[in-house]
Image (cartoon, helix red, strand yellow):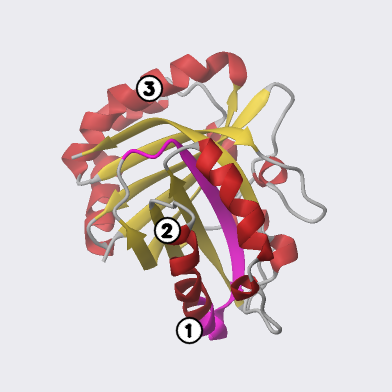
Amino acid sequence: MTYIAGFLVAVPAENKNAYFDLARNAAPLFEEFGARRMVEAWGDEVPEGKVTDYQRAVDLKPGEVVVYSWHEYASGADAATANEKMMSDPRMEAYGEQMPFDGQRMVYGGFEVILEEGEGGKPGYVDGAVIPVKTARKADYLAYAEGLVPLFRELGALRQVDAWGDQVPDGQVTDFKRAVKAGPDETVLFSFIEWPSKSVRDAAWPKVFADPRTRLDNPPHDESRRIYGGFVPEFDVSK
């Protein structure tokens, strides 16, 4: 089953080109390690929230933009092998010295895909979310997400992915748990929807919110602590 390495990064807007140049240069190395796909999506519509948001998740500074990024692997074992290679390969150290962002504030983790629907491809727009879900209600969340698949397909979504937190480490400055204020009885979910364009996405969401299938009396997740935003995939490469 697909495994996701997910990242949130605060990048100075003036370093945008340098960031994507680094991603392009590093991509062959990640492919060598086993990544099947790498996506770097630049923040476009990233709203501030009352409780949580992407800005707080990465301790965003003035002049910075949030990047929503993920690498896809064939399995968790492949992702673990890739991580071992990254930690020991001197080429990775060289890339680390070139980072055009504050690596201490990068949020990262490993996630097991529990829902993957759609063909994907090269999306024109991505909705990315991070959600705290009651660990004991994983099956309830999955049933809810599966029930929404036909709706999003009807409205033009290319692909939906929900990935369950597996290796989500605590960080010294930022981390996924702090990003959504996850409690000890909660698991962090990394979730995204790929759309053919922003216009299709913009037309879809009012219909999503109006559809009764989206309503739950006893949700397995805390919607008030979901962080979400719209991102433009500036870099998307597959094996």
Query: Which residue position holds label 1?
Result: 139
Identified at 44% across, 68% down, the residue is 150
Left or right of residue 223: residue 102: left
Q: Which quadrant would the C terminus be assigned to in this image?
A: top left
Question: Depth check: 175 or 35 in front?
Answer: 35
Q: Amino acid at mark 2?
A: Gln
Q: Which mark is residue 76?
A: none
Question: To which quarter of the image does residue 113 belong?
Answer: bottom left
In the structure shown, which secondary structural element does the residue marked by tag 1 occupy?
helix
Q: Position of residue 41 (x, y in %)?
A: 48, 35
Question: Is 92 left, or right, of 124 in this rendering?
Answer: left
Q: Helix, strand, or loop for circle 2?
A: strand
Cα distance, mark 1 to mark 3?
A: 39 Å
Discs 2/1, front: 2
Residue 120 position in % (x across, y down): 32, 49
Q: Residue at x 59, y 74 (%)?
A: 213
Mark 1 neighbour density, 10 Å: few (under 14) some (14–19) many (20 or more): few
Residue picked out by circle 2: 160
Q: Circle 3 is placed at which residue position? A: 22
Tell me if I can see residue 166 in this picture: no
Region of the chain picked out in magenta, as a range: 122-141
Q: Earlier in the sequence, mark 1 or mark 3?
A: 3
Going by the numbered disc 3, the residue's amino acid type is Leu
Q: Amino acid at mark 1?
A: Ala
The disc, 3 or 2, on the residue closer to the chain's N-terminal end is 3
- Distance between the Cα atoms at labels 2 and 1? 17 Å
Instruction: Look at discs 3 and 2 and give the one toward the viewer.
Output: 2
- Give how far apart the Cα atoms at labels 3 and 2 are: 27 Å
Residue 131 visible somewhere in the drawing: yes
